[in-house]
Image: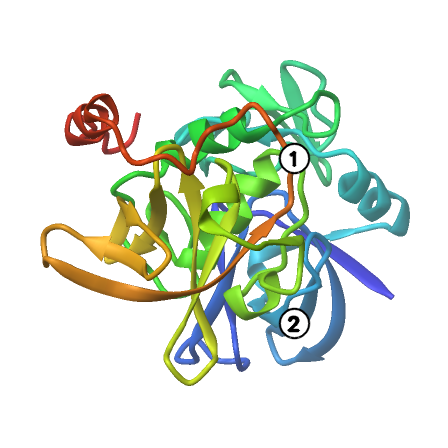
């Protein structure tokens, strides 16, 4: 088996071995992969984090030993900056939130035979309890990121990319697509029982799950639709005030975090919450 890691800021993961092929996902710097197949300058890879498969240009990968791959997979320190420079001896690599810092020691990290310095904020999921308040805090940092099919960064992200990256930063493994994520977690029977951090899934009227978002307090949801935005949520679905209509039909709510009996997220939205939402115009920072 051959192993590798992403050595560029963001690498497109494509459906076929061609630059013209559909981008189905992305790799962020430092994310480890298993190489399944080679075709010219393309590699068919399986992402270590979520098992997702696609084609990546070999120039965007750096080869790892089996021991390095296992170490990168098990011990992950992630960047918490929306954008932060990773400094090498003679160049910078711009990292986005959720990028992996391999072998990070508090100041430096290393990928292959190259050493880098990183001075931004970091998180090592698994070393501390990260609950619903952390999920909400991280999700809000992606507000107004543009929608991009297959995207996983603040420069472009899709609905399931948003949920996956937010949960990844909290140390929770989510699969890549909404239709896969809906198979995870525990169902929540009633909207009144929802708590912040739950995932709400939506179908296309034919029963196919096509959209997902993260439930916020006071019956709101953060999701990627055109951009990462906050909208009202009820048992019918997502209501967009700008369009004055429902845009997504609710199918099911799933919980991946522990139950929090002290949360009161099923109540009607308060004036205070509306004021908070109306004043949130955070782009990136």
166 left or right of 115 in image: left
173 left or right of 201 in image: right
Q: Quadrant of residue 154?
A: top left
Please tell me how many numbered marks the rendered image carries: 2
Q: Quadrant of residue 239?
A: bottom left
Q: Quadrant of the N terminus?
A: bottom right
Residue 200, how many percent across, how many down?
Answer: 46, 54
Q: What crowding class fits label 2: few (fewer than 14 Cα within 10 Å), some (14-19), or many (20 or more)?
A: many
- The residue depicted at 57 percent of the width and 67 percent of the height is 56
Q: Which mark is residue 43?
A: 2
Image height check: is 6 above or below 89?
below
Residue 65, how many percent across, how many down?
Answer: 85, 50
Residue ranking furthest to the bottom: 206
- The residue depicted at 66 percent of the width and 14 percent of the height is 106
Q: Quadrant of residue 30?
A: top right
The residue lying toward the viewer, choosing from 37 and 201, is 201
Residue marked by disc 1:
259
The residue lying toward the viewer, choosing from 218 and 133, is 218
Q: What crowding class fits label 1: few (fewer than 14 Cα within 10 Å), some (14-19), or many (20 or more)?
A: few
Q: Quadrant of the C terminus?
A: top left
Instruction: Estimate the spatial distance between the alpha carbons at disc 1 and disc 2, rounded to whole Å.
Output: 42 Å
The tag earlier along the polypeptide, 1 or 2, is 2
Which mark is in front, 1 or 2?
1
């Amino acid at each position: 088996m051959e192993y590798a890691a992403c050595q560029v800021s963001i690498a497109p993961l494509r459906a076929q071995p061609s630059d013209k092929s559909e981008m189905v996902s992305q790799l962020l710097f430092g994310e480890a992969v298993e190489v399944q197949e080679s075709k010219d300058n393309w590699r068919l890879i399986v992402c270590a984090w979520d098992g997702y498969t696609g084609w990546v240009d070999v120039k965007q990968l750096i080869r790892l030993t089996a021991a390095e791959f296992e170490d990168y997979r098990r011990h992950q320190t992630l960047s918490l900056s929306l954008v932060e420079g990773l400094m090498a001896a003679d160049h910078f690599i711009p990292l986005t939130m959720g990028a992996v810092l391999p072998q990070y020691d508090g100041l430096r990290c290393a990928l292959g035979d190259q050493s880098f310095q990183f001075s931004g904020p970091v998180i090592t999921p698994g070393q501390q309890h990260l609950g619903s308040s952390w999920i909400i805090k991280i999700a809000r940092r992606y507000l107004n990121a543009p929608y991009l099919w297959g995207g996983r960064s603040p420069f472009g992200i899709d609905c399931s990319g948003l949920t996956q990256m937010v949960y990844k930063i909290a140390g929770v493994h989510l699969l890549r697509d909404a239709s896969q994520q809906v198979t995870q977690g525990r169902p929540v029977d009633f909207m009144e029982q929802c708590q912040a951090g739950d995932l709400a899934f939506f179908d296309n009227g034919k029963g196919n799950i096509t959209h997902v978002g993260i439930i916020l307090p006071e019956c709101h949801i953060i999701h990627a639709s055109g951009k990462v935005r906050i909208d009202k949520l009820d048992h019918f679905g997502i209501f967009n005030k700008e369009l004055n209509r429902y845009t997504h039909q609710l199918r099911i709510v799933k919980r991946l975090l522990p139950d929090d009996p002290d949360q009161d997220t099923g109540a009607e939205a308060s004036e205070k919450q509306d004021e908070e939402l109306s004043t949130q115009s955070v782009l990136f920072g």
